[in-house]
Image (cartoon, rainbow, N blue to C red):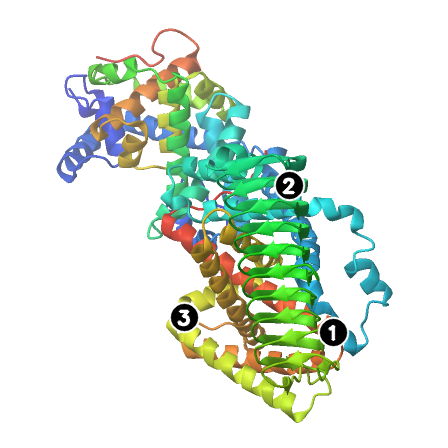
Amino acid sequence: MTPSQGTAQNHLDEMTLLLFLERQLDRERAAEVSSHMQECGDCTTLFRALDRESRLLTRAMLEEEESLPARLASFQQKAKRSMQWIWMVTFGLAATGVYAIYTSYVEPVQNRLQDAGFGGTNLLGLLVFQGAFWKGWQSMLSLVEILAFLVVGVSAALLFRRWFRRGTLAALLVTGMCGALMIPVNAAAFESRKGETVEVSKDESIKGDILLTGNRIVVDGNVDGDVYAFGQDVEVNGHITGDLISGSQTTRVNGTVDGNVRGFVNTVTVAGNVGRNLMAWAQVVNVDSKGKVGRSLTSFCQSLGVDGQVGGDVVSFNQSTRIAGTIDGGLNARGELLTIKSKARITGPVKFEGEKEPRVEEGAVLTAGPVSFTKHMPNHREGGKGYLFFRLLWTCSFILYGMVLTLLMPRFAGDCVSSAENAGPSLGIGLLILLSTPIAAGLACFTFVGLPLGILTLVLWLVLLFSAQIVFGSLLGRWILGPTEDTWGRVGRMALGMAILGVAVIIVHQTNHWIEFFFKMALMIWGIGAISLTIYKRLQRSSGAIVAPPMVA
Amino acid sequence: MEAPKPGRMSSPGAAESTEAITRAKTGDPEAWGELYRVFAPAIFRFCRRALPTREDAEDATMEVFMKVRDKLNQYDSSRPFSSWLYKVAANHCWDLLRRRKIRQDKETEDLDTLPLEHPDANQLEQLIEKRTSEEVRKALDKLPARARMALVLRYYSDMSYDEIADSLGVRRAFVGVVLLRARHELRQALEGSGALAVGGAG
């Protein structure tokens, strides 16, 4: 039998030939097969046939150029579009939040800007910031705040999701937060009431703490515990043995609160008795002529008026402070204006740091001597030497701070600057963090988690604020000198950027307050956003997962 | 960045932009978009070959890319990206088929019993000669899931026997058997008859 006419007995099987073709045989076996094929025509033919079959298969599978279906081609675009939608909501939410923050916290400071000629008569200011245009939206504010808080909650859950199992805990956490906000009845251990008008009626007596939420809240009866009141108007005509914690448009105490009164409100009026301290972040704080505060009064507001009696010290950071009552302690005021009326009696020392000389009317009794006045130089708008020196010092300290940060965390600093190059996401996230963190921290302070966490959050937020400018400065340096991987190169770019930024701030400072305000805000938002994005990416990387954007098919 | 050439994955490795992959790892949406744009057509075609319907392939392509996005940090950049991508796609498609109980377990049992044959080479040549790519594709669609998947992994994705064994969950030693059996089934389908198209010669 010639090799070309070989029989099945000495032919190689198909399997062996296939493995030989696919180079899957070991060297020894491959050599055997190879030498057999040199002698066997049938096996060689089969080998070639198998090879051609392989080629046919590959060709058949590759040949048909089926174009990518439209829905797959637009997969990315859709993802992008849906992201844009999220950014729009974020911006919208944040923009509404701006107004909320403005009316609650910024407005008290606003009048300080009026000496620059940008007063309330300005049409834009009147429409946009005095609230004439927006009054109808007031009721939406609490909703916005809840939304902002939820956004922070969800973001936190996403950030820390590596500690959660498949997001289940995150979902529980968020649900819990929603529950706590929406249905306080079940979430809190103590009693709670909610509704359009919520009241503790005259003949009622409540043992323990109570949470009241509603448009109008009236306490006519007795509460033997603390009262937490959140609503439009809060009025206490009855007796509270504990503290009154209030977040509302107006809070009025006509009755008695044995403990402290703490409020984040627009207007606080004390016409009754507050046994201990009064602390208020508000636009207007009034201690009525019949009103009495047992111990100290601390206020951060636009205008403080004391016609009644305060048993301890008064510390005020207000635009205007007017004393016409009795203070059995010292008065320490900072602001624009201090007026001490003729009926005033102040037993402790009176200190005032402000822009204008305090006005002390004749007949006022200041037992510890006259007002110690320090003239406050709030601005150097004229660009005087003092201001330039101050800016120089400020810029130098920023550069130093930036240098320390860059040297300590070179990679992180580089990543932050890279993130900052994505202006859209940075600005969006920055705005959200800038606005929602203080709200969330404020809420944490006296609702869920307690003071330490709230204060810690605020401190971190302040650190973020200070670091934000450095990120922007570094970005500026990178734009000018180009990117670098060298740490000292980064420091140099940061220093250059900060120097330019310093000059820019001086130039902007000479225009007007609003431009300066928005300029600085934009820088901060940009920087905060970039840092937050970087931290987010870091956490994602360390958790080994990247959150897929909501891709809608 | 050049699109990968399926079937010869080891060669286009150089063309893959490692930079885009690195950037995509950090969550850069632009880089991610670029990766998608470059690799999606090949992955879609892979899914189209491996799965029964076009709709299945479209869904699977999107799911594969979402999976890849989640797992991008697990990608070892010393290996070609397209190999890794096909591996993820193969696992996904095979899981999909398994979930639908399309996978035929009896095939595993048959692996040991594949007879050692020496088919008629001329007959086989004739069969291959006559068939067009179009006919081969139609015949592939008629194959059982495992057979089709094995052929796609080997002759479209150019996967190694180790990778195929891993993807299909069979022992490496059986990969050749799976492939040969798949070829037989394909020949059968090409012939359109119940009998083995190219019968054993001995």
Is residue A367 visible to us here?
A: yes
- Image x and y of residue A468, in percent: 54, 68
Q: Amino acid at mark 3?
A: Pro
Q: In the rendered image, which quarter contains the C terminus of chain A?
A: top right
Query: Mark 3 belongs to which subunit?
Result: A
Q: Earlier in the sequence, mark 1 or mark 2?
A: 1
Q: In the rendered image, which quarter contains the N terminus of chain A?
A: top left
Query: Mark 1 belongs to which subunit?
Result: A
Q: Residue at x 55, y 82 (%)?
A: A395
Q: Quadrant of residue A320?
A: bottom right
Label 2, label 3: how far apart the Cα atoms are: 61 Å
Residue, disc 1: A113
In depth, the one of A138 and B158 nearer the eye is: A138
Q: Residue furthest bottom?
A: A385
Residue, disc 3: A410
**Regarding mark 1 in the picture, which secondary structure is present there?**
helix
